[in-house]
Image: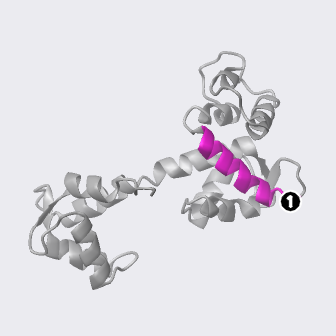
Amino acid sequence: MAAEHLLPGPPPSLADFRLEAGGKGTEVGSGSSKPTGGSQGPRMAKFLSQDQINEYKECFSLYDKQQRGKIKASDLMVAMRCLGASPTPGEVQRHLHTHGIDGNGELDFSTFLTIMHMQIKQEDPKKEILLAMLMADKEKKGYIMASDLRSKLMRLGEKLTHKEVDDLFREADIEPNGKVKYDEFIRKITLPTQDY
């Protein structure tokens, strides 16, 4: 099985994931490169670190109240939000529908991994920020004025206060009356925070 060669010495929780993922008659071990709905779970392991898989398994286990390796579809949104994702109810329904699970059904850890991977991939903060900035730049100059950005940050979405905008501008080295170039701004505000 291809997933078994990804990480040496897996903890028992990852071994459980591999057994669940491969034990359903999917194309995991057949060598087929044709993507099917059932075979995506194990492939997700390639895109997730060992730490992420462990964190997801720990959260999944909290909602697996009967310790059967399954959680209720109704618990999916809460479990995803516990892991930092921000799915809307519509997105959760689409994920469930994609995997043929109705609102009263259950999903295994393999399916949960696939759903989390897809959700996190679509929630790319750089893409969201760039889209918002492009909408503000009607002339497509590659930058917007700091005053325009301040106005948008204080009026749209999660509205920021004057102080929060000031702090953000200070962190990103933006002059209050200057120009804000998209690429530099996005790079500065999406850098991982230092873990002291």
User: Residue, x 36% and y 58% (percent of image)?
Assistant: 128
Residue nearer the viewer, 176 or 127: 176
Query: Is 40 on the left or on the right of 129, as rendered?
Result: right
User: Residue, x 62% and y 25% (percent of image)?
Assistant: 6
Q: Is residue 99 magenta?
A: no
Where does the image place residue 137, in percent across and percent down from the top left?
Answer: 17, 63
Residue extending furthest toward the front: 196
Where does the image place residue 163, in percent across and percent down from the top left?
Answer: 29, 82
Q: Which quadrant would residue 102 be assigned to in this image?
A: bottom right
Q: Which of the image's four quarters has the C terminus? A: bottom left
Residue nearer the viewer, 123 or 92: 123
Look at label 1 and name its amino acid: Lys
Give the answer, above or below, for where 70 lies relative to 34. below
Q: What is the magenta segment's predominant secondary structure?
A: helix
Residue extending furthest toward the top: 31
- Which residue is tagged 1? 65
Give the answer, above or below, for where 157 lies relative to 110. below
Asked if residue 97 can be seen in this view, the reply is no
Residue nearer the viewer, 102 or 152: 152
Crowdedness of circle 1 by 10 Å Cα count: few (<14), some, many (20+)? few
The secondary structure type at the circle numbered 1 is loop
Query: Is 133 on the left or on the right of 16, as rendered?
Result: left
Where does the image place residue 135, in percent across and percent down from the top left?
Answer: 24, 63
User: Residue, x 71% and y 32% (percent of image)?
Assistant: 10
Query: Is 1 on the left or on the right of 191, as rendered?
Result: right
Magenta-colored span? 50-65
Where does the image place residue 193, in percent across and percent down from the top left?
Answer: 40, 57
Asked if residue 184 can be seen in this view, the reply is yes
Q: Which of the image's four quarters has the N terminus? A: top right
Residue extending furthest toward the bottom: 162
